[in-house]
Image: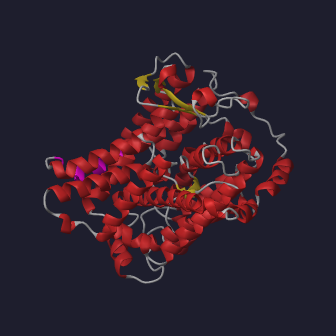
C-alpha cells in the first residue's frame, strides 16, 4: 500500500488517509438523499437513482484514487442535477431518458477534450492570479454551502417576487404533484436565522465545537466534530435514532435499477429523430459540458495548488508531458469518464466534488483517501439507515471551517491593484450567490478580459482564455433563449 500510493512521499499515513476518506464521505453523503429527490421529480424511480448515485460515485472515485492517486471523490453534481430536471426535462420538454442520453454524450465529449489535451491547455491558459482568485472563491462557496445547509441563513420573499413555479409562470404552473421548484427575482431577502429551530442551534454548537477542535490542532478535528454534533442531536430531537432500520428492501432497489440502466440508449434513439430539435439538443449538451468542465477545473485549481497535491513539478509535467504521465492528466481523465459511467446507470453528470476539500483538510493527500471514500459509499448501501441519521447540521460546520481555510488563497491576490481585485471579487461573489463554481469562473474570466482590454493589455490574454470567455457569454445567451 505504501509503495502503490506513495504515502511517505506525500507525508501521510494509512490511518490519516482513511480518516480523510471518511470525512469526505460524510461531507458529501447528502447527495445520496438529495439526488434521488431531484431526479425523482423528473419521473425517474428514486430507489434506482439512489443505487445509480452510489454506483457512479464508487466507480468514478475508485478510478480517481487508483489511476490518478489523488484524494478527490466524484458524485452526481449538485446544480447539474437541478439543470437536468428543472431545465432540460420540465423547461425544454425532453424525457428523462433523453436527458440521460445528453449527459452520456456530454461525458464522451469531456473524454475527447481531455485526451486531446484541450482541458489541460485551458488550465495552462489561466493566469496564476486568477487561479488564486478561484481558490479563494471556492472557499467562500464552500462556507456559504455550509451556512445554507445548516439554515443559519434563511430567505424570505413575497408572492410578487415569484417568477416561476415548477418551471412555469405562477398562473400556469402544474401543481398536481406539489411544488418542486420555485424561481424568484432579486426581491428574495437573505437574513440570519432566528435560532428557534433545534437543528439550527445544533449547527451553531457544531460550528463552535469544530472551530475549537481545529484551533487546538486535534487530530481528526473535522470528523470528530461531525460525530459529536450528530450525537448531541439525539437528545435535542434533531437525530431520530428510532429511524434506524435495517428492513430496507435492497432487492426492490436493484429491480428498479433495471429501469434506468442503459436507459440513455433508449433516449438516444428518440433524441435525434426530430431534426428541428437538433440545435436545442446540441446547445443543451454544450451547457452540460461547460458547467461540468469548469466545476472540475475550479475544484482542482482551488484545492490542489494550495495543498500541494498538484505540485509545481506536476504542473510543469502537465505542460511538457505526453499521455497521462502527470497526476493532473490522470485526474482530469478520471473525472471525464465519470459522467458517462453515471449516465449509463441512470444519474446526471458525475463530477469532482468540492467537498473533497474536507478530507484534504483532514490530511488526505493520496488516492487512498479516494479509495476509502468509495468504500464507505459502497457500504452505505447496507448502512443507509445509519448514514441517514447524520444531519446537515452536523456536516455543515465542517464545510464552513473548510471554507475558512480555503479563503486564505486570497492572500496571494494583490488587492491593492483594482485590476487584480475585480476578477477575484466577482469569482467569489458569483460562486456563492449564483451557487455555481463555473459561473464564478465565468465572471472572473469576463472581468479579467475587461480589465486587460481597458488597460491596453489585450495581448496578455491567452487565446484559450478568449475562447473560454466567449463560450461562457454564449452559454448565458443560450440560457436566456431557453
In magenta segment, residue 64: no
User: 26 left or right of 46?
Assistant: left
Magenta residue span:
405-415
The image quarter in which residue 118 lies: bottom left
Q: Is residue 62 visible?
A: no
| Point 43% across, 61% down: residue | 297
Q: Nearer the viewer, residue 230 or 412?
A: 412
Residue 77 vertical placement versus 183 (above, below): below
| Point 70% across, 51% down: residue | 95
In magenta segment, residue 407: yes
Q: Position of residue 420 (x, y in %)?
A: 20, 52
Q: Is residue 139 visible?
A: yes
User: 239 left or right of 146?
Assistant: right
Q: Position of residue 226 (x, y in %)?
A: 54, 38
Which quarter shows the N terminus? bottom right
The image quarter in which residue 122 lies: bottom left
Q: Position of residue 380 (x, y in %)?
A: 70, 49
Amino acid at each position: 500500500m505504501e509503495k502503490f500510493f506513495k504515502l511517505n512521499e506525500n507525508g501521510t499515513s494509512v490511518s490519516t488517509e482513511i480518516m480523510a476518506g471518511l470525512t469526505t464521505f460524510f461531507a458529501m453523503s447528502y447527495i445520496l438523499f438529495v439526488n434521488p429527490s431531484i431526479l425523482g421529480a423528473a419521473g425517474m424511480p428514486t430507489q434506482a437513482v439512489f443505487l445509480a448515485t452510489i454506483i457512479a460515485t464508487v466507480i468514478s472515485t475508485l478510478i480517481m484514487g487508483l489511476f490518478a492517486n489523488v484524494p478527490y471523490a466524484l458524485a452526481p453534481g449538485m446544480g447539474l442535477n437541478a439543470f437536468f430536471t428543472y431545465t432540460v426535462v420540465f423547461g425544454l420538454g425532453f424525457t428523462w431518458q433523453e436527458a440521460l442520453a445528453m449527459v452520456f454524450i456530454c461525458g464522451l465529449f469531456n473524454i475527447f477534450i481531455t485526451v486531446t489535451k484541450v482541458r489541460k491547455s485551458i488550465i495552462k491558459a489561466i493566469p496564476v492570479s486568477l487561479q488564486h482568485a478561484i481558490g479563494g472563491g471556492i472557499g467562500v462557496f464552500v462556507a456559504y454551502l455550509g451556512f445554507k445547509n445548516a439554515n443559519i441563513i434563511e430567505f424570505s420573499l413575497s408572492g410578487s417576487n415569484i417568477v416561476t413555479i415548477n418551471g412555469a409562470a405562477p398562473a400556469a404552473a402544474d401543481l398536481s404533484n406539489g411544488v418542486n421548484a420555485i424561481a424568484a427575482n432579486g426581491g428574495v431577502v437573505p437574513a440570519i436565522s432566528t435560532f428557534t429551530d433545534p437543528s439550527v442551534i445544533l449547527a451553531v454548537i457544531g460550528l463552535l465545537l469544530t472551530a475549537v477542535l481545529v484551533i487546538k490542532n486535534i487530530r481528526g478535528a473535522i470528523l470528530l466534530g461531525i460525530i459529536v454534533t450528530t450525537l448531541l442531536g439525539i437528545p435535542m430531537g434533531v437525530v431520530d435514532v428510532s429511524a434506524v432500520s435495517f428492513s430496507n428492501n435492497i432487492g426492490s432497489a436493484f429491480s428498479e435499477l433495471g429501469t434506468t440502466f442503459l436507459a440513455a440508449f433508449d433516449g438516444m434513439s428518440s433524441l435525434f429523430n426530430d431534426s428541428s430539435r437538433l440545435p436545442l439538443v446540441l446547445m443543451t449538451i454544450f451547457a452540460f459540458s461547460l458547467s461540468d468542465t469548469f466545476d472540475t477545473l475550479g475544484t482542482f485549481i482551488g484545492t490542489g495548488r494550495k495543498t500541494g497535491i498538484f505540485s509545481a513539478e506536476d504542473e510543469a509535467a502537465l505542460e511538457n508531458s505526453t499521455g497521462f504521465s502527470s497526476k493532473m492528466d490522470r485526474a482530469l481523465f478520471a473525472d471525464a469518464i465519470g459522467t458517462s459511467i453515471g449516465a449509463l446507470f441512470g444519474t446526471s453528470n458525475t463530477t469532482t466534488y468540492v467537498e473533497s476539500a474536507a478530507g484534504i483538510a483532514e490530511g488526505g493527500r493520496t488516492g487512498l483517501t479516494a479509495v476509502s471514500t468509495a468504500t464507505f459509499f459502497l457500504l452505505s448501501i447496507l448502512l443507509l439507515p445509519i448514514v441517514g441519521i447524520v444531519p446537515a447540521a452536523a456536516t455543515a460546520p465542517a464545510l464552513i471551517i473548510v471554507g475558512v481555510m480555503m479563503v486564505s488563497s486570497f492572500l496571494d491576490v494583490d488587492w491593492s491593484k483594482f485590476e487584480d481585485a475585480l476578477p477575484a471579487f466577482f469569482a467569489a461573489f458569483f460562486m456563492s450567490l449564483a451557487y455555481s463554481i463555473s459561473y464564478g469562473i465565468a465572471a472572473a474570466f469576463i472581468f479579467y478580459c475587461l480589465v486587460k482590454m481597458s488597460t491596453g493589455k489585450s495581448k496578455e490574454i491567452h487565446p484559450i482564455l478568449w475562447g473560454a470567455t466567449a463560450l461562457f457569454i454564449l452559454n448565458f445567451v443560450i440560457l436566456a433563449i431557453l
